[in-house]
Image (spheres, helix red, strand yellow):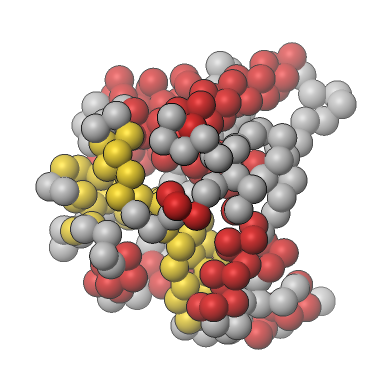
Amino acid sequence: MSYRGSRKHVLDWTGGPLFLDEMSDLLMPVPAAFPAEARFMPRGEAAPDEARLERFGPQLIDDDALWDELEDWWLCHKAGANTPNWDIAVECLLEDAPGIVLVEAKANWPELGVSGKPLSADASERSRENHERIGAAIDEACRGWQTLDTHVSISRDTHYQLANRLAFTWKLAILGVPTVLLYLGFTGDYGIVDAGAPFVDDADWQHAFSGYSASAWPPDLLDRRIDVGGTPVWVVSRSKPVIESSPPRSS
């Protein structure tokens, strides 16, 4: 398969021998330590599956009740339904406690979508109930974040991808899992100009991300340690030059 855009760059990076070292450097000054045998998903094109936390999480923290609670919080009907897939998920230590780095990666401006979670007019009753459960989970997370900053505003019905990332980060912290949410802009992929303007450099990415996230996530909560019920959390924005540009779009 020929991958393009952020998906290609995630697989190029996670398939390389320096991934964990480069991740550590990229996150500084966040005190994330990565064991030499840290587990992560995906692992390049040889193992391209993205992580879902109810499946990947038990490999990191052996507590089935924790991961069951996370899934139950998000879904009332699990068969045929998904929790969010993560571009990258990495085992780490945060302040000497088992934690996780979750990555949402972008390579061009159109990837920063602002739409809400869709629900088709002919959706089943189970789908509608899951839709309502997800909305309630995000609202709960929003109220939780607002105890730290009243300007947080996340919702199922706008900027859904950002909202679900921030909601899961909050819930993981409530469950006692130290978490880093990394928004990562891959820069310099001029192979995807047909799909939209790529991020040119770090300044371009930071400008794009700040504009995208400003209505939901206050700048004062970005790139600093946040205490959520006694659990440390970081929400950070970083950029990384692509290893290789995307190939042309297949005809």
- Residue at (33% x, 70% y) in the render: 26
- Location of the N terminus by quadrant is bottom right
**The quarter of the displayed image where residue 174 is located:** top left
From this view, report whether residue 76 is shown above or below residue 80: above
Q: How many marks?
A: 0
In the orientation shown, which residue stands out farthest toward the right? 121
| Residue 203 location, quadrant | bottom right
Residue 56 horizontal/vertical position (percent): 36, 41
Relative to the observer, which residue lies in front, 66 or 96? 96
Q: In the displayed image of the protein, which residue is found farthest to the left?
A: 96
- Residue located at (24% from left, 32% from top): 230
Residue 224's place in the image compared with 138, above or below, is below
Q: Is residue 188 left or right of residue 141?
A: right
Q: Position of residue 237 (x, y in %)?
A: 46, 62
Where is residue 172 drawn, in percent x and y?
36, 34
Q: Along the line of sight, which residue is nearer the eye, 131 or 56?
A: 131
Q: Nearer the viewer, residue 167 or 65?
A: 167
The x and y percentages for residue 234 are 35, 50
221 relative to 153, above or below: below
Does residue 104 show up?
yes
Asked if one can make out residue 3 in the rendered structure from this viewpoint, the answer is no
Quarter of the rendering occupied by the C terminus:
bottom right
Q: Seen in the image, is 75 located left or right of residue 237? A: right
Q: Residue at x 43, y 49 (%)?
A: 221
Query: Which residue does the image show at 34% across and 75% down from the upper left?
Result: 16
Q: Quadrant of residue 155?
A: top right
